Image: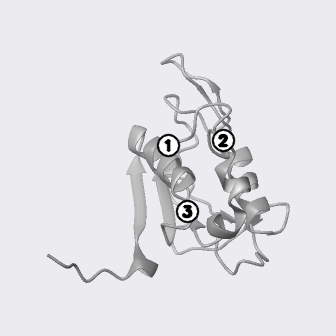
Amino acid sequence: AVLCIDHSRVYVTGESNGGMLAHYLVQSLPGTFAAVAPWFGLPLLGYGLGAQFELVRYTKDSRQTAMLQLHGRDDDVMPIAGGVAGNKWIYEPLNKVQQGWAAVHDCDTTASSTKTYWDGGSGNFSCLEYKGCSSERRI
């Protein structure tokens, strides 16, 4: 059977270990996804840009993928600051992962606060974005 798929609109997402899988898939298949959106998932230490640095090695393809990372500040399973978690795995820090993506997309070197409808509230929600990406994707 032939499937009618718009290849410019294929996305990957996952939560926790599924978020780790989303990172792995987008690194292993550069240029395949329009965007990646991991929830509470970070790569293991040393895998922020891929096991073989695929995000850098295949920059032209990697720049086709936008990134939205969702993470809780109080997560102790995959801590936002990276490092050793209670499960003994060692994770990359979220800011380093995002800075890597910003570099691949030739964005500003520091993240800027971005206003959203959900800012503040009981969860003290906030959003950061690396602006000025020459790839015209959002990180």
Where residue 41 is drawn, which disc sits there? 1
Residue at the spot of label 2: 52
Q: CA distance from mark 3 to mark 2?
A: 22 Å
x 46%, y 50%: residue: 22
Q: Amino acid at mark 2?
A: Gln
- Colouring convention used in this rendered image of the protein: one colour
Q: Secondary structure at mark 3?
A: loop
Kindly identify the residue that appears in the image at 74 percent across and 53 percent down: 100
Label 1 or label 2, whichever lies nearer to me, is: 2
Q: Position of residue 86 (x, y in %)?
A: 51, 18
- To which residue does mark 3 refer? 68
Residue at the image position 74 percent from the left and 68 percent from the top: 105
Residue at the extreme right of the image, as rendered: 109
* SS at badge 1: loop
Q: CA distance from mark 1 to mark 3?
A: 11 Å
Q: Which residue occupies the extreme front position in the image?
A: 1
Q: Mark 3: which amino acid?
A: Leu
